[in-house]
Image: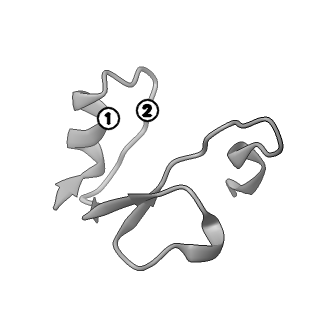
Amino acid sequence: MMSLHDAARALAVHGARATGEGRFDSVGTDTRALAPGQLFVALRGERFDGHDFVA
C-alpha cells in the first residue's frame, strides 16, 4: 500500500493537498469499476474526460 502523500511526492505533483494517511493499493481509471482501496486517476481521452467524474 502507498499513501497519497507518498504518491504525490513520488510523482512530483505540485500543489497537491494530500492530507491524512489515505492509502491505496491499486489505481483505477473507470469510476464505474472502482473498488475499495483504489485511487482514481482522471485521464483525458478522445471521447471522454475523467476530470468530469471528479467530485
Q: Which residue is mark 1?
A: 8
Determine the residue positioned at 27% across, 40% down: 7
Q: Which mark is residue 55?
A: none
Residue positioned most to the right: 47
In percent of width and height, residue 52 lies at 78, 49
Pick whichever of labels 1 and 2 is earlier in the sequence: 1
Query: Mark 1 near mark 2, Cβ–Cβ under 8 Å?
Result: yes
User: Given this view, does label 1 or label 2 mark the residue nearer the observer?
Assistant: 1
Please give the name of the residue rendered at 22% of the width and 53% of the height, measured from the top-left corner. 3
Circle 2 SS class: loop
Residue 3 placement, left or right of 35? left
Q: Is residue 27 above or below residue 50?
A: below
Which image quarter is the C terminus in?
Answer: bottom right
Residue at x 16% of width, y 62% of height: 1
Q: Residue furthest bottom?
A: 36
Considering every residue shown, the one lying at the far left of the view is 1
Q: What amino acid type is highlighted by mark number 2? A: Ala
Residue identified by numbered label 2: 16
Q: Is residue 21 left or right of residue 54?
A: left
As rendered, which of 36 and 5 lies closer to the eye?
Answer: 36
The x, y position of residue 32, in whole percent, is: 65, 74
* Among the 4 quarters of the image, the one containing residue 30: bottom right
SS at circle 1: helix
Disc 1 packing (10 Å; few <14; some 14–19; many ≥20): some
